[in-house]
Amino acid sequence: MARKTSENDSSRPPHGSRDRRPVDQALPPSIVTELREIAASDRPITSAVAGELAARHDLHARYGVTPRRLLNYLRRWRQQELSAASRLPEDGAPVSAPSNQRLREFRQRQASITSILESCFGDAATCKPELWERRAYLMVIGLVYERLASSEEDLPTAELATLAKVLVDARRALGERPKEAEKVVQPIETTQPPGELPEPFCEAVRRVYGTNLRSPTETADSSDSE
Amino acid sequence: MSNGRDAKALKRIRNEILVGLKVVYPAALQVERLLRSLLVLFPTLELDQLKRDLHYLSEKSYVERIIADSENGNGLTPWRRRWFRLTTNGVEIADRCIADPALED
């Protein structure tokens, strides 16, 4: 049996006890309206949100509605809103696929996102459960992908495509420089014994690791001679 | 049972699932991330529909579920937090190197 609720409802449960009526009957209309608006919005419904709402309106003490119960109701209302949005049109026609133009734009956006992710994070290695220390890495990739895919208003697809092209060109330019250097510097057989690495590689190793590739024997001989 | 979607929409959604996973291939993607990106193109897409399509694509060996060590072994991980990635077959379908009549528009 539905009962009216109001701010001064004398049928409210005693202070701090649990009200077993449905939430939309236990709370005053003004609070129910606010909760319905939250359920109909895109705001994430989490326990933190429910706790904040419950604390702000003092729901447990005043109306016997716990944050947990409020959370369950918010999620149920959210599900009802989503179900209502996906209900079949009144004429019974099924939900149709997006247009080809729309699909082309989406695919272009996906391609741009792929280029950007590769540029920013490198080639994503194979996901293996035993390497779960990389979970944060994968989570970041997933979050960036979701944000880029869904932020069409903030970041138009044309701008994403331009950024992707710039990043690809930059990577290509970086990738070309080492190859050009290797073409110019050839190992000189007269000055290096057979099997020795070309001079630029040794210099690169020395630069990076602060050492060289000579064998310990050679190193000792050279230090003795000095 | 198409659940209110015509055949064209069904194929489009399944193709876009493969394309979305291909963006991060060979890494995996959580269902939540995939769902939110697909909502851009299919605003009325629901999690239940996505779950069914992922089951279908898994049984066709186009996608596979990645179970992390930190996940519960009895399969009680919430669907939104499950990880999926493309298989090699899925990559070939997404790249249109091979054709599947059930997914062709």
Image (cartoon, rainbow, N blue to C red):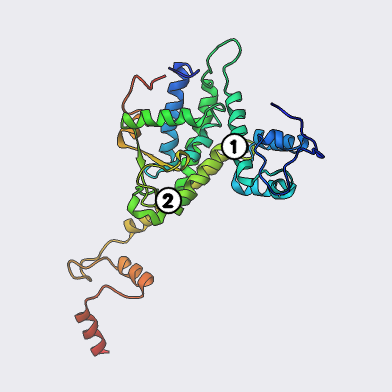
Residue A17, x across and y down, in percent? 68, 47
Q: The residue marked by circle 1 belongs to what chain?
A: A
Crowding at dot 2, Cα within 10 Å, few <14 / some 14-19 / many 20+, comes out as few
- The reply to whether residue A81 is in sight is yes
Question: Looking at the image, which residue sits at the far left?
Answer: A194
The residue under label 2 is A122
In front of the other: A176 or A73:
A73
Q: Between tags 1 and 2, which lies in front? A: 1
Please report the residue visible at 53 percent of the width from the left and 22 percent of the height from the top: A98
Kind of element beneath mark 2:
loop
CA–CA distance in space, label 1 to label 2: 38 Å
Question: Looking at the image, which residue sits at the far top?
Answer: A91
Q: Name above or below for residue A51 compared with residue B16.
A: below
Please report the residue visible at 21 percent of the width from the left and 85 percent of the height from the top: A221
| Image quarter (top left, top right, bottom left or bottom right) of the C terminus of chain A | bottom left
Kind of element beneath mark 1:
helix
Count numbered badges in the picture.
Answer: 2
The residue under label 1 is A75
